[in-house]
Image (cartoon, rainbow, N blue to C red):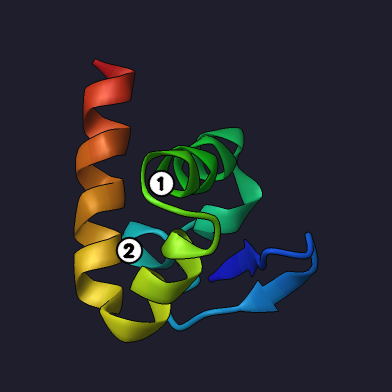
Amino acid sequence: MDLKNQHGTRVQGNANAGENGGTPLNQTPLYDAWIELLNQIYWEGYAEQLASENPEAFASEYSTFSNHYQS
């Protein structure tokens, strides 16, 4: 997963592919909005921390966000 750290530099996380090995999540505007939303709700760098410490929870929460946004 490709995230920006608190300095705006892109950093690598653990899970970088969408469901079924499709388009990497980091290549969508929706993914960028998800990262920005998490960092605004909690603190700058929260999305990066969650992705590295608990990639399954990060992916699950992103999936929920994505499904609700697209409905």
Residue that mark 2 sits on: 20
How far apart marks 1 and 2 lie (CA) works out to 24 Å
Q: Nearer the viewer, residue 24 or 13?
A: 13
| Residue 3 relative to residue 61: left or right | right
> Which quadrant holds residue 67?
top left
Q: Nearer the viewer, residue 22 or 34?
A: 34
Q: Residue at position x 54%, y 56% from top?
A: 44
The circle drawn on residue 23 is none
Tell me the amino acid under the disc marked 1: Leu
> Which quadrant holds residue 3?
bottom right
> Which quadrant holds residue 18?
bottom left
Relative height, residue 27 to residue 11 (above, below): above
The circle drawn on residue 38 is 1
| Residue 15 relative to residue 58: left or right | right
Residue 28, x across and y down, in percent: 59, 42
Q: Nearer the viewer, residue 65 or 6?
A: 6
Tell me the amino acid under the disc marked 2: Asn
Residue 52, x across and y down, in percent: 41, 82
Relative height, residue 32 to residue 54 (above, below): above
